[in-house]
Amino acid sequence: MTPAPLPYGLAGDAARGDPGLVSTPAAGPRVADDPGQAIAAARKAQGLTQSELARQAAISLSLLRKIERGSRSLTPGVRAALDAVLAPAPAPADGAADPGRIAAAFPQLREVMDAYDIPPDLPYPMRPLTELRRMTSSATAWRLSSQYAKLAGLLPGLITDLTANALNSAGHEQEQAFGLLALAYRAADAIADKHGRHDMSGRATELIRWAAARSADPQLEMMGAYVRAELFFSGQHARSGLRMIDRVTAPAPPADDVPLLATRGALFMRAAVLAARAGIPDEAADRMAEAQAIARQVPDGVYHGTAFGPGSVRVHELALAVEAGDVGRAVRLAGRWQPPRALPAERRSHFHIEAARGRAHPARLPSSSAFRSALAPRWQRRGAASPRRCPSPSARARVPRTGNALLSGQRRRRGVRRASAAPAPRAAGGASPRGAGNRSPAGDHAERDR
């Protein structure tokens, strides 16, 4: 039996240095009046056997046979899984916003991750490692560009094939398969984390480390530590996270090993933010200085799935200023540099989120005239007449109260509250007014580079 067509509803690589798979158009009729017959026709049009379609859609062969015979109805989840293989809907322009397709992938991902150490029973010969390497490169590229809908269609089948290859081979080929599997698990961690499946993200993090340890590649083991460090971002165990990073970054690699140097630099960036969150500013400055020194030796690029270089360091310098509450420095960093398009989308979004965190933090606004100026409306920055002088009350109401005007309003309201001695009225039955006491301060949220 020959290998199945390129799986998971994907075809071809992009024939460029940064390989990527592109979505195939629908190759057969969509589900119509008779869903079972339509699925059978679409399957045959793509040259798939029932076994191959069942495996790629992560459903049982017996269920597929019953659906095609018409003795079982299609559930929404099964329909989405079959559509992802037979006739995937065109991805949005950014490939990211397809909630139905992404949600349908999570049960499949959970299943293949639970069977991480069990060789799958493939109904076709194992795919060659060269093909799996191209597909894994595509998964990494889509992760870095936040193409989560595409990842959702690729990952369950890719992880299954890589698991089969890793557990049924030996020697250097097995080590390579485990290395690719570690990168595929990292993509699974990203899609789970970005969509709130934090238990699955934690599971994927451990599987990254499990596969990386079997790859005999120190760079992949460092990548595993880079992802794991996020677990220590809460600050309560930050020093444990720093010790974990120290363990994998020593000793220093040779100066001519650029990929290993870059991965080490990425770990120092992460350690700097970790130390800042733990309230250890001197440690944070030292770690960032190490990252800056390495960034002067290597260009911006993606090294074993991790972006590093001068641009990535600039993003983390901004993150460090925000974590330290240095609003003035954050404003200067955000104002004098913008991430170039060549930087991965995930890194660029990190930069803009950190800039927004600094600008929006209410506790920091009164202490920085630079921030008040940056937040002021255009007419105020240019020295134009204030809308408060407009004769029309309706015209004044249309002007958004931002910047200094907002701060003045806040001060007036605080004065009114202090002057009022009467308690707030309570609703019937002793309940508090709607919403009172139920607000929680917005916590810091930094985009995590998966």
Image: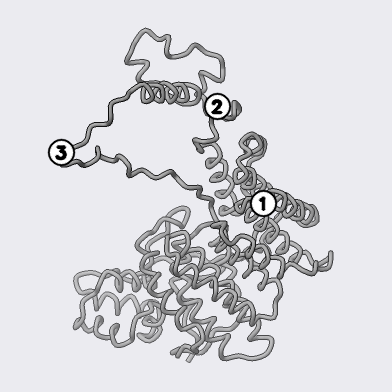
Q: Earlier in the sequence, mark 2 or mark 1?
A: 1
Q: Residue at x 73, y 67 (%)?
A: 249
The circle on residue 428 is 3
Amino acid at pointer 3: Ala
Distance from Cα at disc 2 to Cα at disc 1: 28 Å
Left or right, residue 417 beside residue 378:
left
Residue farthest along the right direction in this orientation: 255
* Residue lying at the far top of the rendered structure: 391
Of circles 2 and 1, the one toward us is 1
- Quarter of the image for residue 271 reads bottom right
Distance (Cα) linking label 1 and label 3: 50 Å
Q: CA distance from mark 2 to mark 3?
A: 42 Å
Q: Which residue is mark 1?
A: 280
| Vertical arrangement, residue 329 with respect to residue 164, above or below | above
Q: Which residue is mark 2?
A: 372
In the picture, measured across the screen, residue 302 lies left or right of residue 450, that is right
Name the amino acid, label 1.
Ile
Give the quadrant of residue 66. bottom left
Q: Residue 205 appears in which quarter of the rendering?
A: bottom right
Find the residue positioned furthest to the left. Answer: 428
Give whichever of 60, 413 is nearer the camera. Answer: 413
Residue placed furthest toward the front: 421
Relative placement, left or right, of 407 versus 302 is: left
State the residue at coordinates (40%, 10%): 390
- The amino acid type, in three-letter code, at marker 2 is Arg
Residue 392: x, y in percent? 34, 10
Up/down of 306 relative to 59, above or below: above
Q: Which class describes the residues within 10 Å of circle 3: few (<14), some (14-19), or many (20+)?
A: few
Name the image quarter holding the C terminus: bottom right
Q: Secondary structure at mark 2?
A: helix
